[in-house]
Image: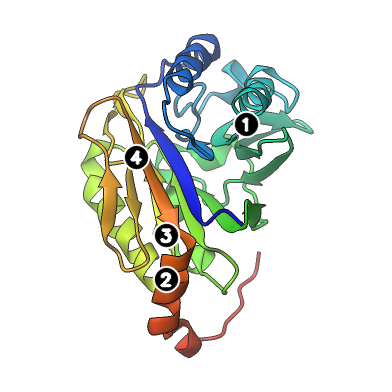
């Protein structure tokens, strides 16, 4: 087990529907990491920006971006995760891909598609939870709009770290900040939210607020607003277990189930 999991979150200005330039930038940024890192986290639709024209930028699981993720993971001996536009069986998915340090991958398809922007009209919703086991940590990956739905994020004593990757715009940034802390507190879990900066072809402005939050809801590291940067920190397994032992709130949780 890795007692301290060292994480680097890339807060970037994504070049619109330009995977080649985006991947080049990410590779250069990762090469500049001085300290040992176990996990690199990229934003939602990291290779294109939040496009609702998937026919312009969809890739396969054997395509450029996933192949690049495998290459980076193997070269740097770390895991990398982020979402991209995937076409599979004639359906488009906003798919989060996790590649571990051996080049093995797992993926999660975004469940809650953002109807306000018409994402539900062009993408297919996922309905499967996944828990990624990595270096003795259990990681639950989710995407952007999923943050607004606490039932889907519920910790049933099956994860240690909850990760949200996003293209979350400035007008709703208060919700982002508030709900990330709420998810940490209610699930007694570390929570990481990785957001982008800049603007996109939808005329939306993004100001970041990438942050790492401990199980008590305290922000332990965060980004500089509106700036491209890398937010690094280590999360501690012993600290997590001590908090859960002291505050056994999950013992009193309600039991429920929901339909897919």
Mark 3 to mark 4 CA distance (whole Å): 20 Å
Q: Which residue is mark 4?
A: 168
Q: Secondary structure at mark 3?
A: strand
Q: Residue at x 62, y 26 (%)?
A: 69
In the image, residue 136 above or below residue 93 = below
Of callouts 1 and 2, which one flags the residue occurring earlier in the amino acid sequence? 1
Crowding at dot 2, Cα within 10 Å, few <14 / some 14-19 / many 20+, comes out as many
Q: Secondary structure at mark 2?
A: loop
Residue 140: x percent and y percent?
Answer: 56, 56
Residue 228: x percent and y percent?
Answer: 29, 24
In front of the other: label 1 or label 2? 1
Q: Secondary structure at mark 4?
A: loop
Decide if residue 136 is on the left or right side of residue 13: right
Q: Secondary structure at mark 1?
A: loop
Q: Nearer the viewer, residue 152 or 223?
A: 223
Q: Residue at x 66, y 39 (%)?
A: 100
Q: Nearer the viewer, residue 258 or 30?
A: 30
Residue 85: x percent and y percent?
Answer: 59, 29
Mark 3 to mark 2 CA distance (whole Å): 7 Å
In front of the other: label 4 or label 1? 1
Of callouts 3 and 4, which one flags the residue occurring earlier in the amino acid sequence? 4
In the picture, the quarter occupied by the N terminus is bottom right
Q: Which mark is residue 190?
A: 3
Mark 1 to mark 2 CA distance (whole Å): 29 Å
In front of the other: label 3 or label 4? 3
Decide if residue 10 is on the left or right side of residue 101: left
Q: Which mark is residue 77?
A: 1
Q: Are marks 1 and 2 in contact (CB under 8 Å)?
A: no
Q: Which residue is mark 2?
A: 188
């Amino acid at each position: 087990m890795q007692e301290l999991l060292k994480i680097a979150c890339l807060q970037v200005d994504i070049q619109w529907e330009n995977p080649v330039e985006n991947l080049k930038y990410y590779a250069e940024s990762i090469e500049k990491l001085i300290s040992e890192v176990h996990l690199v986290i990229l934003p939602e639709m990291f290779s294109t920006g939040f496009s609702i024209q998937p026919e312009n930028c969809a890739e396969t699981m054997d395509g450029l971006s996933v192949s690049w993720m495998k290459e980076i993971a193997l070269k740097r001996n770390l895991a990398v995760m982020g979402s991209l536009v995937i076409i599979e069986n004639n359906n488009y998915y906003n798919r989060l891909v996790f590649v571990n340090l051996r080049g093995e991958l797992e993926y999660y398809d975004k469940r809650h598609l953002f109807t306000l922007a018409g994402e539900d009209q062009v993408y297919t919703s996922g309905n499967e939870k996944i828990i990624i086991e990595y270096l003795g940590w259990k990681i639950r990956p989710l995407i952007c709009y999923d943050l607004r739905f606490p039932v889907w994020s519920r910790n049933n004593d099956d994860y240690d770290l909850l990760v949200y990757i996003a293209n979350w715009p400035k007008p709703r940034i208060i919700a982002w900040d508030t709900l990330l802390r709420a998810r940490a507190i209610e699930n007694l879990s570390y929570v990481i939210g990785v957001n982008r900066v800049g603007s996109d072809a939808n005329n939306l402005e993004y100001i970041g607020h990438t942050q790492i939050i401990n199980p008590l809801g305290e922000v332990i590291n965060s980004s500089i607003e509106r700036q491209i940067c890398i937010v690094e920190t280590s999360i501690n397994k012993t600290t997590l277990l001590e908090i859960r032992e002291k505050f056994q709130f999950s013992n009193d949780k309600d039991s429920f189930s929901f339909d897919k």
